[in-house]
Image (cartoon, rainbow, N blue to C red):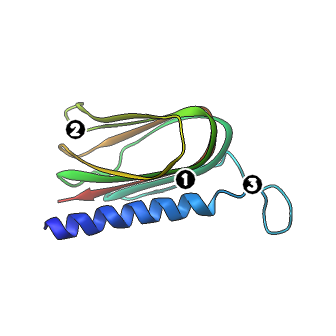
Amino acid sequence: MRCRTSVTRHFLVVAAAGLAASCVSLTDDHGGSATVNVPVVGQTAQALGFSVQARGFSFEQRYGSPTQGDSLALGLAVVGYTGGSALIEVTDSSGTMRLQQTVTTSLAQGSTVIHGRPPYQVHLLFDAFSGAFTLAVAAQS
């Protein structure tokens, strides 16, 4: 099981870094501006993925996912950070805060595992944030 957890964690970090790196350019292939401040979200019972190319981005949302798993693996990548802040909070079904992190710098890759009781709630709060931000959260048994 430990090997599987390590592989899952590694996958999340690589996926998050890859998604963030793909969002770095602020121009599209035709020389125009790329879409900014439009989050891309994928959500299932087992996982949550969130990515945004941000410029002065202010946004708040709570996601009721993942709804399964005794633990969660989180992967985060922030590339091209130039200002503002992003708050990540994860609570479990008891309302206990399992993770609280404020991002105010670039982060090539970061990962952590948290334990709790599903379902989980992921709260994201951006305040004038600028940079490419990608978060991946996946349930583990």
Q: Is residue 77 left or right of residue 75?
A: right
Question: Where is mark 1, residue-wise?
Answer: 51
Number of the front mark, 1 or 3: 3
Q: Residue furthest right?
A: 31
The residue sitting at 65% across, 48% down in the picture is 38
Q: Which amino acid does label 2 sit on?
A: Ser
Return the disc, 1 or 3, that comes first in the chain's sequence.
Answer: 3
Q: Distance between the residues labelled 3 and 2?
A: 39 Å
Where residue 10 appears, x then y in whole percent?
A: 34, 65
Q: In which quarter of the image is the N terminus?
A: bottom left
Q: Which residue lies furthest to the left in this view?
A: 1
Q: Distance between the residues labelled 1 and 3?
A: 14 Å
Q: What residue type is labelled 1?
A: Ser
Question: Where is mark 2, residue-wise?
Answer: 93
Q: Quadrant of the C terminus?
A: bottom left
Q: Can residue 138 be seen in this view?
A: yes
Q: Which amino acid does label 3 sit on?
A: Leu
Quarter of the figure with residue 46: bottom left
Number of the front mark, 1 or 2: 1
